Image: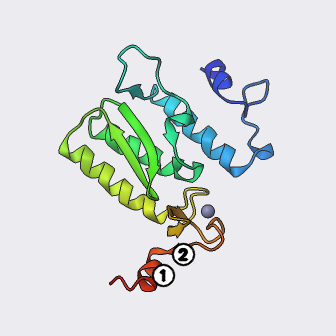
Amino acid sequence: MENEVYMITDWLDQNGNPKIEEQTQKEALCLEFERYLQSIGGLKSAWYTDKVPIISRNICSCGDGWLPMIQNLIQELIDAGWNKEISQIKEKFGSLRFYIGGGSDEMYTIIGKYEHKSLEICEECGEPGELVISNRWWQTKCDKHKPEGSFSQKEFNKKFNIE
Ligand SMILES: [Zn+2]
């Protein structure tokens, strides 16, 4: 197990122990997420039947700040009986999109809850954030990670007189 972890990350020392103190918070988030995926035996591709388990953080096309939230989502789905078949995990219009191979109404309700929740979590760092627009690009960011000149949905609505 430790050897496999070593192969997928550069964040362990030669004894297989995390070098977290030398690493940034983002790398720690990635490490934690990949260790979680490893602990559940990985996710499965909904597209291919005989692929290796997915244990890389790169399955998520979004910022590292959302990884802890995605981990909670995965666990809730597994508890609801999910077969771990994943099509795509990504950011779109500032919120999380999580596409599974198939599932129950309960599972889609859980996913909807987290897609909504993602609009309040900075995609960059995981701190509380809000939906802002910058150069026609919607993203959910905290005050620290908001692009310069971006503005919130509220300010956007005010600017264009949308109720
Ligand atoms: Zn942030």
Residue at horizontal 57 percent and vertical 53 percent from the top: 65
State yes or no: discs 2 and 1 in contact (Cβ < 8 Å).
yes
Residue at horizontal 59 percent and vertical 41 percent from the top: 32
Could you say where residue 41 lies in the image, as x and y percent from the top left?
46, 25
Is residue 129 visible to us here? no
Q: Residues within 10 Å of mark 1 (few under 14, many from 20)?
A: some
2 in relation to 138, above or below: above
Secondary structure, mark 1, is helix
Mark on residue 135?
A: none
Q: Is mark 2 within 8 Å of ligand 1?
A: no
Three-letter code, disc 1: Glu
Q: Is mark 1 within 8 Å of ligand 1?
A: no
Could you say where residue 97 lies in the image, as x and y percent from the top left?
39, 48
Three-letter code, disc 2: Phe
> Spatial distance from mark 2 to mark 1, Cα to Cα?
6 Å
Q: How is the image coloured?
A: rainbow
Quadrant housing residue 115 = bottom left
Could you say where residue 51 lies in the image, as x and y percent from the top left?
43, 16
Residue at horizontal 74 percent and vertical 49 percent from the top: 24
Q: Residues within 10 Å of mark 2 (few under 14, many from 20)?
A: some
160 vs 27, left or right, is left
Could you say where residue 45 lies in the image, as x and y percent from the top left?
39, 26
Mark on residue 151?
A: 2
Q: Quadrant of the N terminus?
A: top right
Quadrant containing ligand 1 reads bottom right
- Residue wearing tag 1: 155
Q: Quadrant of the C terminus?
A: bottom left
113 in relation to 108, above or below: below
Secondary structure, mark 2, is strand
44 vs 3, left or right, is left
Q: How many marks?
A: 2
Query: In this orientation, which residue lies closer to the viewer: 110 or 139?
Result: 139
